[in-house]
Image (cartoon, helix red, strand yellow):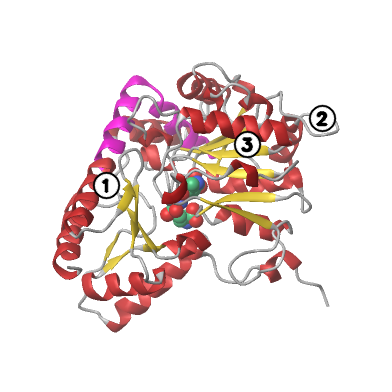
Amino acid sequence: MIKRNKGLANLTAGYLFPEIGRRRREFAAAHPEAKIISLGIGNTTEPVTPHIDAGLIEGARRLGTLAGYSGYGDEQGLTELRERIAAVFYDGKMAADEVFVSDGAKCDIGRLQLLFGSSVEVAVQDPSYPVYVDGSVLIGAGGAWQGTGYAGIRYLPCTAANDYFPDLDLLPTDGLVYFCSPNNPTGAVADRAQLTALVEAARKRGTVIVFDAAYAEYIRDPALPKSIFEIPGARECAIEVNSFSKPIGFTGVRLGWTVVPKELKYATGETVWADWNRICTTVFNGASNVAQYGGLASLEAAGLKEMRDLTDFYLGNAALIGAALGTLGIACIGGANAPYLWAHFPGEASWDVFARILEKCHVVTTPGSGFGPAGEGFIRFSAFGHRTDVEEACRRLVENLR
Ligand code: PL4
């Protein structure tokens, strides 16, 4: 009989977010009267804003006309969109052909593993978005489960003790490090000095940084970098993944991009850019053309204003959650330049706190341990929700967790 992919066999548990959905459904079935509010999965809730929606509608309308119809497009994305992304998010510092439009950051994180194969040593911030670890395990680079983590993954603890920035002496040599800022799940944002140190360390060790900037548009402090490519030397050692999901509510529409600079090379001298182009043209057929017209509209002046207003709205939710946790005396970080808050429940297991909040408040959260061993004892609160739901969730937290 056919053999199972060893990477799949190595995965110990189900993917975190479906597990949260399963526990929520189980609770709802047992308590049909409960009006459950989710501050769990980071899923956008507000309607697509008018100018951007008009871009989507116009994209769909064109497809119904002889002159405007288009079939398969370039796998790398519409030239106009690549140019706009390069201009708006990278100030023209990255060339349009270094921008590869995708169907989302998560999908690109999965495909990126093909560049480096199963023998690369992988490091992740601990805690981190689970796709970095699970994707590495799937491709065979993660190794076997060893109690609290995978043998082939280097977990770089990011805790209050190190200001949520890893010890760079732990970076692998000639390996891969996933780095997310603003961070999911902690909401911590690396400053310029920290990212400069990261780039210097990566270059010294021949390690590639996969920088996940999916929440960059939530940064309000102008001193904080939104892209790794603001840091000198990053062109030689970094790839950036990004997304339209959280800035404009395209979680369901599906649109993102990855930037691969042409200076990034393998030990053998070939460019990573050429291989990424090969992978994209081989196992990807391009993002939806309708989605790309929506993306283009978001990068016009009216769209950028809507993006700012929408991210302000979710940051307003984050402020409410932060205030509620403050009233309860629960220590937390994040929420100021990120849509997540990371709350500490010392001495308690994350899944136990998750269950307590669900039972007492009928509020779904995400257990910190699902993001890595250093997440044990923490709970992530997501700021994605309708304002009335967030207000009600905060009221319940304050009343029932005292
Ligand atoms: C649940 C750091 C959320 N089913 O929408 P994409 O693919 O462009 O971006 C996904 C993504 C990429 N990078 C980071 C992220 O946090 C996310 C989305 N994460 C969360 O609650 O942590 C949604 C999770 C979704 C998933 O598995 O991604």
> Which mark, by number, is residue 72?
3
Q: Quadrant of residue 366?
A: bottom left
Q: Position of residue 98 (x, y in %)?
A: 63, 25
Q: Position of residue 107 (x, y in %)?
A: 58, 48
Looking at this view, name the residue that lies furthest to the top: 92
Q: Are marks 3 and 1 in contact (CB under 8 Å)?
A: no
Q: Position of residue 205 (x, y in %)?
A: 72, 36
The reply, left or right, for residue 394 in relation to residue 12 is left
Q: Quadrant of residue 35?
A: bottom left
Mark 2 Cα shell of 10 Å, populated few (<14), some (14-19), many (≥20): few
Distance between mark 3 and mark 2 Cα atoms: 29 Å
The quadrant in which the C terminus is found is bottom left
Q: Main secondary structure of the magenta part?
A: helix
Q: Secondary structure at mark 3?
A: loop
> Which mark, by number, is residue 270?
2
> Which of label 3 and label 1 is nearer to you?
1
Q: Is residue 313 above or below residue 69?
A: below
Distance between mark 3 and mark 1 Cα atoms: 40 Å
Question: Which sits in the foreground, 235 or 254?
Answer: 235
Q: Is residue 94 above or below residue 320?
A: above
The reply, left or right, for residue 188 in relation to residue 106 is left
User: Which residue is labeled 1 in the image?
Assistant: 318
Looking at the rendering, the stretch of residues picked out in magenta corresponds to 286-313
* Badge 1 amino acid: Ala
Question: Which sits in the foreground, 306 or 113?
Answer: 113
